[in-house]
């Protein structure tokens, strides 16, 4: 059972001594996603597993649907380890597809519904994806048109599978076969899927997560969050994101035998009636949504009394806002500071109010190793702020096929450099103080500055570009692109329109464009983003 011999090429694994330690401690238990669902169906067959739109399925029904779909996907020719880009909204098919792929040992690549040609084209090409799974339309966007464009450019892409009206492609509904598939169970130490990194580089990085490591993180999360068969989890954030997937999210809820309720949109209009109807006990939100929910709850139109607590994470939740959750929503709050690369921190349900309001929690595992270091990589004094480095039983040791980047993003002894600036309280809780990475956190949506800069540079009127964050009362941060024009500056809308036309996800399009003659430089001659951010406060926003 070596973690390295069976590993997918291009996915750095844990050294054997660490893997042995994690198994011995009982963290890695040799479970796989396919078997977990099978076992839950045996134990909780008649319980409701999933509610979405007008569909409801018990664990037994979900398990059977997943088997049928796995058989159909196999008949289509999908093989173990084939990569499959999954881009679905919060609909039941999302879980049927991913569990069917898990059973086949094929590897979902979790794209977000907001991704467009640039991102999807890259995921399909980089992973040499064999299939791409979409809904026909969602949020006013036709994913079939996107699929046609991507397919033209990606020779590896053999299948486009569509929930709803398939147009020229294959209807997912036609694949639920009656003949059972003959499956070769994937190994627990195998990669199960790819999550996406928020990133700070030119192209998004792919995060290989194994059955062993991911199931440990969601099992421990379910314990910390006290999930059981009576738990009703509302998945309001995009299901593909790590937070609503495993912290403890939908997977943690399935693990505990609870019920997952899907909201197609996280707005109070959609979510509140669902909470009242399904007696939702728990959900996960990003800070701007939590604010919107707190405002909307004042109207008192919906019965939210079933909510035990909400989780807030993905970006910093202010202490002032955290302190208002109980008086507005009538439930508790848990802060969650996590990352798709692994490490997740939670405030605990029985923590003192001061910890819950003022900190971003402490790690899941006693085996999570944390270091807080200065710019030279030396440990800071206790309580001081520095960059967080981490390694542990569910934190990756490297991105997929990214050797050169891995050499920078991980220390030689395997710590992941999070790029987050944190300090640790005497109780061992983390407070996020800022960021050392070149990324903008737009209310939980992560924007890699370099990626947007590269796309701007492709415009003929752009000589140079630097993308920075600007403070925003609602999202926490928005993006501003500073541009040195080649010749006369074009209208800002010409640039944003250009990015949109290239097919960049909407959340990455700069909120503001400022033309300048030159960029301020640091002592060593690099563009000083700090100085650029400072000039913003002196320039009133053009609104
Ligand atoms: C979650 O995952 P990602 O991969 O989208 O983003 C990770 C980054 C962190 O490195 C940090 O910069 C930021 O998002 N972040 C927070 C935060 N939670 C995440 N910054 C401040 N305060 C927080 N509470 O965002 C994610 C994954 C699992 C659970 C929760 C969030």
Image (cartoon, rainbow, N blue to C red):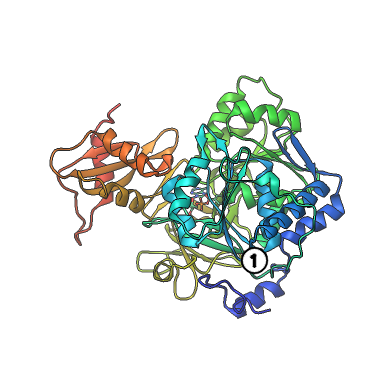
Image mark count:
1
User: In front: 299, or 543?
Assistant: 543
In the image, residue 533 sits, relative to residue 395, either above or below, namely above
Query: Does residue 432 show up?
Result: no
Image-based side of 54 in relation to 469, left or right? right
Instruction: Please tell me how crowded label 1 is: few (under 14), some (14-19), or many (20+) other residues with Cα within 10 Å.
Output: some
User: In front: 461, or 444?
Assistant: 461
Identified at 48% across, 46% down, the residue is 148
Identified at 20% across, 62% down, the residue is 524
Image-based side of 509 in relation to 340, left or right? left
If the image is split into quadrants, where does the N terminus sit?
A: bottom right
Image-based side of 478 in relation to 88, left or right? left
The x, y position of residue 149, in whole percent, is 44, 47
If the image is split into quadrants, where does the C terminus sit?
A: top left
Query: Does residue 162 show up?
Result: yes
Identified at 64% across, 65% down, the residue is 79
The x, y position of residue 186, in whole percent, is 69, 68
Image-based side of 357 in relation to 35, left or right? left
In the image, residue 445 sits, relative to residue 387, either above or below, namely above
The x, y position of residue 281, in whole percent, is 72, 38
Say what secondary structure mark 1 lies in. Answer: loop
Which residue reaches farthest left?
487
Which residue reaches farthest front?
168
Question: Which residue is the site of mark 1?
Answer: 80
Mark 1 CB near ligand 1 (8 Å cut) = no
């Amino acid at each position: 059972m070596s973690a390295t011999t069976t590993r997918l090429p291009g996915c750095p694994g844990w050294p054997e001594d660490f893997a042995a330690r994690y198994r011995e401690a009982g963290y890695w238990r040799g479970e796989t996603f396919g078997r977990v669902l099978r076992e839950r169906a045996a134990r909780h067959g008649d319980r409701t597993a999933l509610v979405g739109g007008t569909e409801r399925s018990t664990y037994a029904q979900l398990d059977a649907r997943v088997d049928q779909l796995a058989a159909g996907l196999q008949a289509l020719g999908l093989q173990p380890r084939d990569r499959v880009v999954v881009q679905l909204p919060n609909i039941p098919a999302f879980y049927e597809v991913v569990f069917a792929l898990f059973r086949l040992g094929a590897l979902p690549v979790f794209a977000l519904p907001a991704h467009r040609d640039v991102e999807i084209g890259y995921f399909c090409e980089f992973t040499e994806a064999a299939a791409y799974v979409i809904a026909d339309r969602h949020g006013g966007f036709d994913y079939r048109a996107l699929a046609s464009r991507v397919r033209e450019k990606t020779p590896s892409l053999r299948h486009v599978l569509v929930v709803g009206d398939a147009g020229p492609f294959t209807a997912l509904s036609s694949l639920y076969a009656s003949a059972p598939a003959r499956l070769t169970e994937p190994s627990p130490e195998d990669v199960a899927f790819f999550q996406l990194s928020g990133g700070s580089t030119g192209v998004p990085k792919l995060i290989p997560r194994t059955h062993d490591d991911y199931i440990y993180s969601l099992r421990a999360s379910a314990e910390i969050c006290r999930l059981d068969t009576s738990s009703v989890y509302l998945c309001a954030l995009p299901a593909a994101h790590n937070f609503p997937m495993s912290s403890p999210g939908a997977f943690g809820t399935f693990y505990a035998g609870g019920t997952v309720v899907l909201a197609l949109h996280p707005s109070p209009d959609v979510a509140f009636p669902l909470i009242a109807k399904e007696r939702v006990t728990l959900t996960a939100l990003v800070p701007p949504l939590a604010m919107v929910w707190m405002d909307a709850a004042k109207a008192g139109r919906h019965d939210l009394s079933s909510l035990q607590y909400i989780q807030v994470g993905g970006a910093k939740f202010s202490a002032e806002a955290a302190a208002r959750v109980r008086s507005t929503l009538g439930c508790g709050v848990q802060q969650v500071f996590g990352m798709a690369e692994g490490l997740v921190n939670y405030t605990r349900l029985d923590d003192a109010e001061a910890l819950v309001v003022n900190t971003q929690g402490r790690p899941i595992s006693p085996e999570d190793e944390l270091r807080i270091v200065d710019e030279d990589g030396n440990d800071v004094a206790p309580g001081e702020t520095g960059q967080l480095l981490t390694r542990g039983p569910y934190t990756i040791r490297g991105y997929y096929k990214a050797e050169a980047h891995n050499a920078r993003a991980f220390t030689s002894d395997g710590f992941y450099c999070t790029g987050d600036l944190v300090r640790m309280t005497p109780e061992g809780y983390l407070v996020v103080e800022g960021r050392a990475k070149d990324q903008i956190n737009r209310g939980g949506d992560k924007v890699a500055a370099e990626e947007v800069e590269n796309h701007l540079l492709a415009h003929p009127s752009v000589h140079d570009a630097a993308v920075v964050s600007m403070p925003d009362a609602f999202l926490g941060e928005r993006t501003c692109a500073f541009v040195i024009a080649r010749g006369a500056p074009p209208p800002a809308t010409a640039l944003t329109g250009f990015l949109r036309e290239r097919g960049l996800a909407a959340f990455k399009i700069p909120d503001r464009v400022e033309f300048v003659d030159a960029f301020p430089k640091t002592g060593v001659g690099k563009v000083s983003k700090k100085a650029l951010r400072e000039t913003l406060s002196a320039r009133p926003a053009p609104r």
